[in-house]
Structures are given as structure tokens and as C-alpha cells.
Amino acid sequence: MQKINVGLLGMGTVGEGVARLLIKNRELIRSRVGTPVHLKRAADIDVSRARNIPLENGVFTTDALSIVNDPDIHIVLEMIGGQTVAKELILKAMENGKHVVTANKALLANQGQQIFQAAHEHGVDLAFEPSVGGCMPIIKLLRESLVGNHIYAMTGILNGTCNYILTKISEEGIPFESALAGAQAGGFAEADPTMDVEGFDTAHKLAILTSLAFGMKINFKDIYIEGISSITPLDIRIAEEFGFCIKLLAIGKIRDNGIEARVHPTMIASGNILSSVKGSLNAVTISADAVGDLFLSGYGAGMMPTASAVISDIVDIARNILNRATGRVPLLAYQMANIKQIPVIPIDRISTHYYIRFSALDQPGVLSKISGILGNHDISIKSVQQKGRKQKGSVPIVMLTHRAKEAAMKQALAEIAFLNVISHPPTLIRIEDENDEE
Amino acid sequence: MQKINVGLLGMGTVGEGVARLLIKNRELIRSRVGTPVHLKRAADIDVSRARNIPLENGVFTTDALSIVNDPDIHIVLEMIGGQTVAKELILKAMENGKHVVTANKALLANQGQQIFQAAHEHGVDLAFEPSVGGCMPIIKLLRESLVGNHIYAMTGILNGTCNYILTKISEEGIPFESALAGAQAGGFAEADPTMDVEGFDTAHKLAILTSLAFGMKINFKDIYIEGISSITPLDIRIAEEFGFCIKLLAIGKIRDNGIEARVHPTMIASGNILSSVKGSLNAVTISADAVGDLFLSGYGAGMMPTASAVISDIVDIARNILNRATGRVPLLAYQMANIKQIPVIPIDRISTHYYIRFSALDQPGVLSKISGILGNHDISIKSVQQKGRKQKGSVPIVMLTHRAKEAAMKQALAEIAFLNVISHPPTLIRIEDENDEE
């Protein structure tokens, strides 16, 4: 084969990065593959996007379908995003026998089964390293490096926008809204930040990772999702006083009766290596039977880090094409026949440690009422402290609990909120405690 | 193909782990590969080593050569170590058309070119993920994930024994000898710790990583090596006061006139994520044009973490066998024709930041004499402090320098050591400063 021809769909941030890297590091990539990897066509509906990139004449088109139908193209890169046009183009490309690389986590999380099935049926490779964690090779790690391991748990910081905002709140003591505005001004958050700050983007990535780690089909709607918009500088400061920091974590764990798959603000010990992941960085810790804990950190978004992951997928597929080894690594890390149906445990049935902050009237007997209700629900208190100053007659009371059931905790908090000594709804943040597993 | 047959040579710690994992996770591995991976034979000269492992009848032998010559065996695992018998067996296995997995970093570092050449000539796969960093998939990262990147630098903690000892000295303030004795008692150091504490093991791993990262042949003897046996609790404490910690680092960097490849105790800022790598953990930071910085950490040694890396190599090779795709990934990350000859820059010609500690008589004019000599050699001082108490009339004087040439520094130190106000040979520790690159 004289060269591997690549067609790029979508020239937004990631697509532009891929085009740039394929051009800039052309010789490097050829020396890895042994055959040139050629950007034959690149499409975007926005003509202006082609202007900044040194594309050869005739490469740019506004007609994505012409790329998908080009008989000379071996690999199609879907960098459009969204779940409509992108999906149609991917399916059409596969139907035409083309291999596909996609960064589309929303599509894979919500409609992955159809996409994976299509790849399987058409006998093409589907690669998606750029869909999770930017340049971190987390997909390859799960599909290839940890093949000898039963994975127990994954804990990840998978959204740079959230981590940037939480870092700012922590370092500058500013409220969420200001930190978000700063992130938007600095290019670390979208104009509409909902997908990021409300945890959906993280959950998309968790869906993909749980599929691979546990060899299962997952229904995206089963993932519990809670964002960071209610996190206050006060909670972050108190967390620090207790030796914790607050991160938006994606948590996937295998349990006797199913898996836990949840995304929420989480307190972790400041000695936990995930605490040292600041700003827009991403990171993940994987716990498994042979390796113990393995930790990975890097830029989870951005033009060139994500493009690096795309190139790694292109080279993998090119090496498969050149060796007639398409399908060499199973799409979901396990042979299709071995993909399991594992239930996701509803959040109410998980048990974990909790941080609870109450605003209570500064009166005798308050603590006894609160702890009485908690005790009635089998929740035992590990530590209780009055934190901060009195405001309008109320003082913040902070409790850390031992492991407790989420349903019991919710019931207890509902009862406590009804007490006339409680002036605001209680704040609840889950704690991941490495040293106290079930 | 009905099954992939594996033959194990050497049943020491790693070999035992591999046998255990192949047996325990047999079903898991089959569900990854689609075909059973069968431990057909396992050899050790020490019969007692077979007793602890639930091997099937007829698997164990004391005759390693019978495995290498067994026509039914597809993959030979060399877990013997050393550069004589292990090398002969690897070469013989390859000659017999068998693929090889090896954990033998000393062999690859010293005689890798011959081994790689043999694999190339006989058209077999040679995999060596377990040779560097235990369970960390650093080889796969360099050969597959970072293929679109020009790698600028690697900085690694690659020896768990040294990191364990340095952590103990730091946390307990005990001298090197006591920390070493504790490590030996706890199973974290060998009876003869020379290879580890004098930096040779780290250098073996650096040799392998530099080959892959920079696509080059490296002569092991060109690597500068300095161990940790002269590190004192005093230097670690002073480092901490300056906001640094001391790690034994493997450093590989590409420069205009060659590469730096050096192993020595190094001061790094306590905010550097490598500082958070404690105890027997390993870690590596890779800097490259597309990804920026990528960080990886995990258990770099031990029975099961290393066995995990072996299984990952076995599965890679098995997938190649089943797809007739042997040689799919080039041995040294680049096509053989693209492997370069890049000189290693001698240590005298590098320039870096330095920490220097003098024991000087507590007299007026001492500082002016020392700084005068440094100035004569174009070494400028960033910070100077008198640290600690006077002992036998001498006080410790600590200096941090701006970037300076190693040859100039050595010459200056030799002149300073001659001053009659200096009571002991000066201590010199190199500093890696992330924020001040050339």
C-alpha cells in the first residue's frame, strides 16, 4: 500500500489540531508506520475554518458526505460532535468499509451499542481514544495494558472545566459564578457551560470507561449525575481544614450486586494523588487485582492533546490495515460474546462516607436533635465541629459520618431539614475514603 | 488456532507472578483474546519454586532448553535475568521462531541491539513492557500512544528501592544506612543493593526509554550514573526548607547537539507531581509537542504488578499471532530504517541548576571567597543561606545557583575544596527546574 488516506470531518478545535498535527509531524508519523499517512480530504460547513490551516489544494470541502463516499479514503475521522449528523456519517462510513476514529463521547455514551454493533457487522475498526481524557491513553490502557487484570474501581477527574473552576474557588476563595466567568473569559469553559459544570460530559466519559473496564453494556441513564454549581468556597475551606479537597469525580466500582457508576462533587484526602491534579488537567486512578493502583494524568482537552490521541488511533488502525489485522483488539476490550449485562446500583442503595453542613440556630440541644435523627437511621458520626462565624443567628455545623447508606442519609436529612432550629437546607458532599473499603 | 501456548523460563518473583496470573485469570484472558492462553511449560533450576504454584502435572521442568525447543510453544517468557543464560535462551527461542517477552532490562540496556536485530531477522515479536516501570504501560505509551508526538523530555522515578529509601530518610530523618537496612528487612531492597542504590537499575531502564522516545541507538556506557548512597537527612531537610524534595531521577532530554541521559539524585519542587510519588511507587513524566506533559504512576516492581505487564505483552503477541500480524508495531517504536544515531552529551557539557552545601569555618570573608570562585567560573548564585548549627567550628552554607555549566561547577568546587576555610568536600545536588528551560 502506497499510503494511508485519511478523511477529516469537522474542523473545530480538535479537527484543526488533527489537521495541523498530520501536516506538521508527517515525517514522524511515516517513520512510525512505515507508510505515509495522508490527509486527503477535510470537511467543514464553515469555509473560514480552512483558512488557518496549511491544507494542500483540493483537500478542503464543505461536503462531508463526499469524504465518507470517497473510495480512496481508508480512515474517517469524525470530529463534528453531536448525535445526529455525526452518527449518520459514522454509520455511512462504516457501511462503506471505512475505519472510523471518533472523539464523540456523547454519541458513544448514549448510542454506543448501535455504533459498536455497526463496526462489528461491517468488519471495520472503530477507535475512540480522544473521546475520554484527551491525551491520556486511558482507552488503550483498558483495552490492552490491563488485559490480565480484574478491574475493581476507577476514579477520575475527567472534565478540565470543572477542575479548573474548583481549583479557582479553592485558591482564590471566590464563588462558583465568578470562577465560571473567569473560566469562560480564559477559554476554559464554553459559553453554555451546562454539559461541563452539571457533570454530563464527565458522565459520558464514565459510561465509556465502565463499558471497557467491566466488559459490560451500560445504559447512560443509569449513571447518577450531580454537578459542581452548588459548591461553595465555604465548603471547600472547611474541607481543607479537615484535610480534604473537593473534586468532581467519575466513580466506577464493581460490587457484588452490580456496579456503582456515579458523578458528583467528592471530598478526597489531600494526600490522595488526585488532589494534586490542579487546573484543567485530567487524571484517573484505576484499581485492579494485579496492578494495585495505577495513576495517569494529563491534558484532557484542548487542540493538540486531543489531536495526539486521534493520531494514536490513526496509527493503530493504519498498522492494522497494513497487516490485514482489522479487529485485532476487540472494540469493548472483551470479545463480543463475553460482554456482560451488569446492573448499575441505584444511588440510593450505595453506601459511602458523608460530609454534611447544617446552618443551625445557636441554641442548646441542636446537636442532640440532629445526631438523634442520624442515629435513628443508623448513621454514626465520625466527627462534628462548629465551623465559621455566626450569621443571622445561625452557625454552620459540620459533620463527617462513618460509612452509611445513601437512602438512610437522604431520609435523615429530610427529617433534619424540618427541624425548626435548621435555617437552610443541609449541604451534603460524599467522601471517598481510600482506607475504608467495604 | 485452538490455543496459544506459553513457556515460562524462570520462576523467581516475577515468573511466579506470571504463572499465578495466567492460572487465576485464565478465563478473563481468554475473554480478551478469544482463544485460551495456556501455560504449557514452566522451567526453573530450583525445583522448590514449583511447589507454591498450582501448576498442572507435566508443566514444570528443570530443563529450560526443552521449552525453547518445544515446537508447540508460541511465546517464550524470559524471567530469568542476567546476561548470559537468559540471552542464549532468548536467541535460541527466536531462532526457533518463537515470540519472546522479557523483563530483562540489564540485557536490553547492554546488549539490546543484538537482541532487537535477532528478533527482526527471525521475524518474531519481542515485547518488554515488564522491563521498565512494572505495571506502568510506559513501553506501550512510547511505542503506540505518543506516535504523533516529538518527545522532548522524560523524567522518571524508576527504582522503587531508591524511592522507598529516600522517602524513609525524608519522613523519619534517619541516615541512608538505616533506611537501607529497613528496606532490606521489609523486602524493599535486595541483600546486595548495589544495582538499585547506585543507580544502575534506573540507568538500564533509562537506556530502554531513551531508545524508544528518541528513536535512537544508545550505548549504555554513555549514561551518567550517580546513586543515592551519599544523600543525607540534612540535605533532605534543607531541600524541604527550600521547597524541594530529593528523588533519584532518570532524565532523558533531546537537545540541539544530542541527548541528555543521566541518573542522579535530583531536587525537584515540592509542587512537582513527581514529589508526591512516595515509597516504592514509580512514576514518569513525559513532555512532548502535542500532549504537553503526561504523567504516569504505579507499582514499578513486585510480583503481580510486573506480571500484569507480562500478560499485557502476551495478549498483544497472541492477538498478533491470531491475526498473522507479527511485527505490527516496530520493536523500537520507529521503523528500523528510521532509527537514528544521536550522541549522548557528556555530563560535563550539560548545564543545570545546582544545590551546593559547604562545611565552612565560621569566619568573616568565607562567603566572599566562595562566591568569588563561583563568579570566576560564570556561576551566579540565586540564594545563599547558613543552615543548621555550628559543629566543630564549621557551619553548613547552602547555595542554590542559576543555570550553570557542569564542567565549570566541578572546576569551581575543586578550587573551593582547596580553601583552608572549607572543612569537608562540598555536597552537590542537581536541581530540575520546570520553569526555567534553556
Image (cartoon, coloured by chain):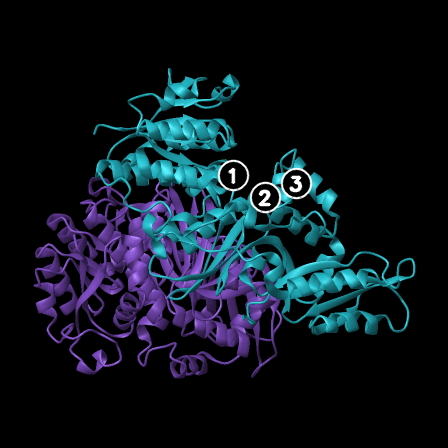
Chain colours: A purple, B cyan
User: Are marks 3 and 1 in one subunit?
Assistant: yes
Res. B183 mark: 3
Q: Is residue A35 left or right of residue A382?
A: left
Q: Are marks 2 and 1 in contact (CB under 8 Å)?
A: yes
Kind of residue indicated by mark 1? Ala
Kind of residue indicated by mark 3? Ala
User: Are marks 2 and 1 in one subunit?
Assistant: yes
| Residue that badge 1 annotates | B106
Q: Is residue A344 left or right of residue B399?
A: left
Kind of residue indicated by mark 2? Phe
Residue B120 lies, with reference to residue A65, above or below; the image says above
Mark earlier in primary sequence (3, 1): 1
Which percent across, then down, holds residue B117?
A: 37, 39
Chain letter of mark 3 equals: B
Q: Is residue A323 left or right of residue B65?
A: left
Q: What kind of element bears circle 2?
A: helix
Q: Nearer the viewer, residue B416 or A282?
A: B416
Q: What kind of element bears circle 3?
A: helix
- Residue A294 seen by the camera: no
Quarter of the figure with residue A385: bottom right
Q: Nearer the viewer, residue A322 or B285?
A: A322
Which percent across, then down, holds residue B249?
A: 58, 54
Which percent across, then down, holds residue B215?
A: 40, 53
The residue positioned 61% from the left and 78% from the top of the image is A389
Q: Nearer the viewer, residue A236 or A25?
A: A25
Q: Nearer the viewer, residue A193 or B172?
A: B172
Which of label 3 and label 1 is nearer to you?
1
The residue positioned 75% from the left and 49% from the top of the image is B174
